[in-house]
Amino acid sequence: MRPILDIQHVTHAFGHHTALHDISFSIKQGEVVGLIGRSGAGKSTLLRCLCALERPQQGHILLDGVDLTTQTERQLVRARRKIGLVFQHFNLLTSRTVAGNIALPLQIAGRPRKDHAKRIAELLALVGLEGFEDKYPSQLSGGQKQRVGIARALAAEPTLLLCDEATSALDPESTNSILALLADINRTLGLTIILITHEMEVVRRFAQRILVLDHGRLVEDGSLLDILRDGQENQTLHKLLADIRPSLPAFIAENLSPSPLTEPHKTIIRLVLSGDSATTPLFSMLYAHYAVKATLLQGGVTTISQRLSGDIILSLEGEHIEQALAFLKTATQSMEVLGYVPSHP
Ligand SMILES: Nc1ncnc2c1ncn2[C@@H]1O[C@H](COP(=O)(O)OP(=O)(O)OP(=O)(O)O)[C@@H](O)[C@H]1O
């Protein structure tokens, strides 16, 4: 199947500063993708290239088979209609009602005026705001404004929904409800969604696939589990993950040594579990096979992309530690030794 979006070797610079270096990835119909990066990583520049507001100096961007980099300005007007944009600060027109805001893309697309009311009612039902047609943005909460923003983005039936920090201005409860709404829209309409954010927690809960940008380069394209695994080696991923990973309790961190101690000690490890490894009775196996006692220090098991997954920190103490570690390396998605602490501080 042809990808909905195909980014091929995109490079873009501002003067001497290269904001995007040779970026390539493609997205299939119905995928939900999180694009994450720290400030200055190049997210906005990539977004502007995707919307054809910026023409990359090199490379190609194919949206539904149409190469945006070779289109004339006139052709781009039509191509841009295939993208629905959801903004961080909603960008609603305060002088227009909810219905007036949602009607805007319908007017621009030249949809007959007589069809607007029906389409607006359908969209408001989809985003859970039935009967809100005549309200003004000032009468709405942040979460409700974003629902209107989403309805407006969907009005002209885009091929791709681009959400730019769509939950960053919202409180945690509204963030949850907007993420749930987007997941629902993806399920019911089969719409392809890209969520651009600097928050790992948002992509963790929402995206099946995560793209990580760093200093203008695509440094990861995979699932959260891939990122958890690769985060051991890659500093950028490590830093992004710090927001969502369990951290060492202070009383352990203070006494942690990078190498084994001569006195009796505990080995502190981090494990990533998924699927079978999340349901294997690891603790009893460690004790039965290696006489190693494991204590859970931090973390737990949750559901990621419909699979049980765990990210936990353990302390291990016992006879056959080396063999136990070798077993955990093969039985889990990732095993990392964080350090060593005295058995009796
Ligand atoms: N119009 C511009 N002129 C010059 N440099 C720019 C311009 N736009 C972006 N840059 C530079 O390109 C790099 C990438 O910026 P970009 O805004 O794409 O990052 P970002 O990941 O969106 O960051 P943030 O999350 O802070 O918005 C930065 O170093 C930025 O300073």
Image: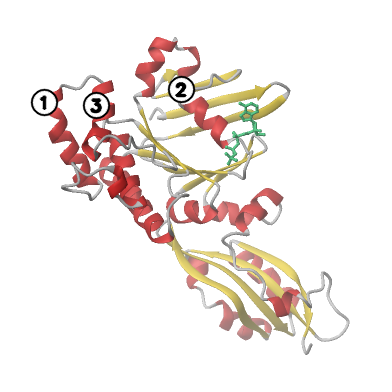
Q: Position of residue 102 (x, y in %)?
A: 26, 34
Q: Is residue 67 left or right of residue 102?
A: right
Q: Amino acid at mark 3?
A: Leu
Residue 272 screen position, x and y as percent: 58, 64
Image mark for residue 106: 3
SS for tag 2?
strand
The span from disc 2 to disc 3 (Cα, nearest Å) is 24 Å
Q: Are marks 3 and 1 in contact (CB under 8 Å)?
A: no
Quadrant hosting ligand 1: top right
Q: Amino acid at mark 1?
A: Lys
Residue contact at pointers 2 and 3, CB within 8 angstroms: no
The disc label shown at residue 114, or none: 1
Taking 47 as reference, is 128 above or below it?
below
> Which residue in the rendered view is the most extreme toward the left?
114
What residue is shown with label 2? 62
Picture quarter with the C terminus: bottom right
Name the one closer to the observer, 197 or 262.
Answer: 197
Residue closest to the eye, 174 or 237: 174
Disc number lying in front (2 or 1): 1
Pick the residue in front: 296 or 105.
Answer: 105
Query: Which residue corresponds to the image point at 67% horizontal and 37% vertical from the top-left?
Result: 215
**Chain-order first, disc 3 or disc 1:** 3
